[in-house]
Image (tube, grey):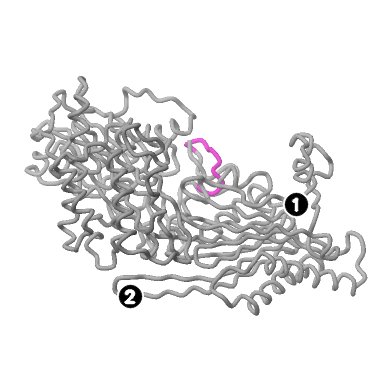
């Protein structure tokens, strides 16, 4: 089937246009210049930008013999594979530039093959391929979506590891797109991370702090345990496989299967564990040597203890992190940064032989703002003749660049209102509320900290009073009285405050927790649920969706704005929406396709927002549609490492 890129409708493979929304299934839109490009083109014919769907292909020659590798911890390319000579009948010889990897002619090779001598030294090849049918669902994707079952004996062993880890949704593990066995070749297609910088190169940059290096240590420790489940810890031993994404987060380009996972008889447990810890220490030692920077004493000691075997379990390694961070605190106790902090939990349980969690210090990693981007848009919808929604953004972002430090500070307010009261009513109320609140904070928000709850509520009351007085002045009555909902977000660096009245919503999206609704609608249905009524009964009422409060129709005694504060300790996408977008669970149903990709700094927020508006028009369209997207990126604070 073909999945429409616009509305995600499932179309027959023979369709040229989506039978639901009419979008072309034979063309794609260039992300740079916006022209239509053939679906199987790699580059835009107008501006030259790469717009094709590229996958990273791992092609392995199937052999019956399985070799083992000495457990030395040496860092060698493709070390899980034995050397196989390239013969005249080698399946590799079928491959050439611009030829297809599969019999259906979907995946076209974009690179020249290595010369025969290089191919003879390796059992596997890796290269980029162009997906000439990107809207078609692959067998692996259908399996992950539970639309079909796949016979595990028909896919490569390496693909099984990706499938098992896919449920973890860990950003370090590349997503698998497709996999198959064909003749004497096994093929696995992954998201392409070949252009990401290698960790060893980023490590040597002068701007990289010791705190960031410690955070990479922590990430590798956590990944080690995750990869152990599928026998792929070797993935962390290949220096060229360790990459850093645009947010300075450690990721893997691919997975490597450990030799022990390929051997039918199990390895002795003590031998397996010794390999794990010593090999990880060897990677860290090599990275430290290549960085040519002065290391903390406890890092040097940790590496020596790993090499000598004094540390031989993952639990000991975690405990050492805690202890040495305590010593770091004793040497220099920094003042607590105004930025917020997050707790790094190294283990859920510890053995009885280890120090109890209550007796060891907790590593606290203070986070600071790394980047802030936003976009806002409003659309009249498909059924209304005028727009009663309104939004306002007032953002001040300051960036300080130094040779070994980068500091980003921000003070921003994002306001979205959905007006009511008919023509020359709703649009007046929503605009008046936005401008009143914006002006209030321009005059009163002068400190580098969030306004107090009382101050935020005062802004809401002022907006309500402005609309109320206009209603009184114009002698508006009944349904003719103008009013508006309100949802508002205030940011001071990586600290946030939200306030809302009515049913306009604020959602947040993170990689760990997915999509969460942070506001509760002020409507009859929710009021009844708060009183203990069953949701099915509460929303069975005819007036279930009637607002219980809004700005403007009545004086301030009738409104009770909800105000909440929270810290942003991980990368986050904050989404403010009117009900034209949130109705019919539009976001809850489509967040993985329309919001999750926007967490990446490489994605275009404005284009993503336009796609979201188009989705809402397709899904709903009965009302005005407004949304504000705010992408907040954070990183460990240079002054924020301390121990409780």
Q: Residue at x 25, y 41 (%)?
A: 235
Q: Which mark is on residue 522?
A: 1
Identify the mark at residue 402; answer none if there is no mark. Answer: 2
Residue positioned 50% across, 41% down in the render: 3
**Horizontal side of residue 500 vs 556, given as left or right:** left
Q: Quadrant of residue 354?
A: top left
Give the left or right position of residue 339, taking residue 123 as reference: right
Give the image quarter of residue 348. top left
In the rendered structure, which disc, 2 or 1, sits on the residue that comes first in sequence?
A: 2
Q: How dense is the environment of label 2, judged by Cα within 10 Å: few (below 14), some, or many (20 and up)?
A: few
Residue 189's quadrant in the figure? top left
Q: Residue at x 32, y 54 (%)?
A: 325
Residue depicted at x 15% and y 57%? 289
Residue sitting nearer the eye, 633 or 314: 314
**Residue 260, horizontal then vertical, whole percent:** 20, 28
Q: Residue furthest top?
A: 265
């Amino acid at each position: 089937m073909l999945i429409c890129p616009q509305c995600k409708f499932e179309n027959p493979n023979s369709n040229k246009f989506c039978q639901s929304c009419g979008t072309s299934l034979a063309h794609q839109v260039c992300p740079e210049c916006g022209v239509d490009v053939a679906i199987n083109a790699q580059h835009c014919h107008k501006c030259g930008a790469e717009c094709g769907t590229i996958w990273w292909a791992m092609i392995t020659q199937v052999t019956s013999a399985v070799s083992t590798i000495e457990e030395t911890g040496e860092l060698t390319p493709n070390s899980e594979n034995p050397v196989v000579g390239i013969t005249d009948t080698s399946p590799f010889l079928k491959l050439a530039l611009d030829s297809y990897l599969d019999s259906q002619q979907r995946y076209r090779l974009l690179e020249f093959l290595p010369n025969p001598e290089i191919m003879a030294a390796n059992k596997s090849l890796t290269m980029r391929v162009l997906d000439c049918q990107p809207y078609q669902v692959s067998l692996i994707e259908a399996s992950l979506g539970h639309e079909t079952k796949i016979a595990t004996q028909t896919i490569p062993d390496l693909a099984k590891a990706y499938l098992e880890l896919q449920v973890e949704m860990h950003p370090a593990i590349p997503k698998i797109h497709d996999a198959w066995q064909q003749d004497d070749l096994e093929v696995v297609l992954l998201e392409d991370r070949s252009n990401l910088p290698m960790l060893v190169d980023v490590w040597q940059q002068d701007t990289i702090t010791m705190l960031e290096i410690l955070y990479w240590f922590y990430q590798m420790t956590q990944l080690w345990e995750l990869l152990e489940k599928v026998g792929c810890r070797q993935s962390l031993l290949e220096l060229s496989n360790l990459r850093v994404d645009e947010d300075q987060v450690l990721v893997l380009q691919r997975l490597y299967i450990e030799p022990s996972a390929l051997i039918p008889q199990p390895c002795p447990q003590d031998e397996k564990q010794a390999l794990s810890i010593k090999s990880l220490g060897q990677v860290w030692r090599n990275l430290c040597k290549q960085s040519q920077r002065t290391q903390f004493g406890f890092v040097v000691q940790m590496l020596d203890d790993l090499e000598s075997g004094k540390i031989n379990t993952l639990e000991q390694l975690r405990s050492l992190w805690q202890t040495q961070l305590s010593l770091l605190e004793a040497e220099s106790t920094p003042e607590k940064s105004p930025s917020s902090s997050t707790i790094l939990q190294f283990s859920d349980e510890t053995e009885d032989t280890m120090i109890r969690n209550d007796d060891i210090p907790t590593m606290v990693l203070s986070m600071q703002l790394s980047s802030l981007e936003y976009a806002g848009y409003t659309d009249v919808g498909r059924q209304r003749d005028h727009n009663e929604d309104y939004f306002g953004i007032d953002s001040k972002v300051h960036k300080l660049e130094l040779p070994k430090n980068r500091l980003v500070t921000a003070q921003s307010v994002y306001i979205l209102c959905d007006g009511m009261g008919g023509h020359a009513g709703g649009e007046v109320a929503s605009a008046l509320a936005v401008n009143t609140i914006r002006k209030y904070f321009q005059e009163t928000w002068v400190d580098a900290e969030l306004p107090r709850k009382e101050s935020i509520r005062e802004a809401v009351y002022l907006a309500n009073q402005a609309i109320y007085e206009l209603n009184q002045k114009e002698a508006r009555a009944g349904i003719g009285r103008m009013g508006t909902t309100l949802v508002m977000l205030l940011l001071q660096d990586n600290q946030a405050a939200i306030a809302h009245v009515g049913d306009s919503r604020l959602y947040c999206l993170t990689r760990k927790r997915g999509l969460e609704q942070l506001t509760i609608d002020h409507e009859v249905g929710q009021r009844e649920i708060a009183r203990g009524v069953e949701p099915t009964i509460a929303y069975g009422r005819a007036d279930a969706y009637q607002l219980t409060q809004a700005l403007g129709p009545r004086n301030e005694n009738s409104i009770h704005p909800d105000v909440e504060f929270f810290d942003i300790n991980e990368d986050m996408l904050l989404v403010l929406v009117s009900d034209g977008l949130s109705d019919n669970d539009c976001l809850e149903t489509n967040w993985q396709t329309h919001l999750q990709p926007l967490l990446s700094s490489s994605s275009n927020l404005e284009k993503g927002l336009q796609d979201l508006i188009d989705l809402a028009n397709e899904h709903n369209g009965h009302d005005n549609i407004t949304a504000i997207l705010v992408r907040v990126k954070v990183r460990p604070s240079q002054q924020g490492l301390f121990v409780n």
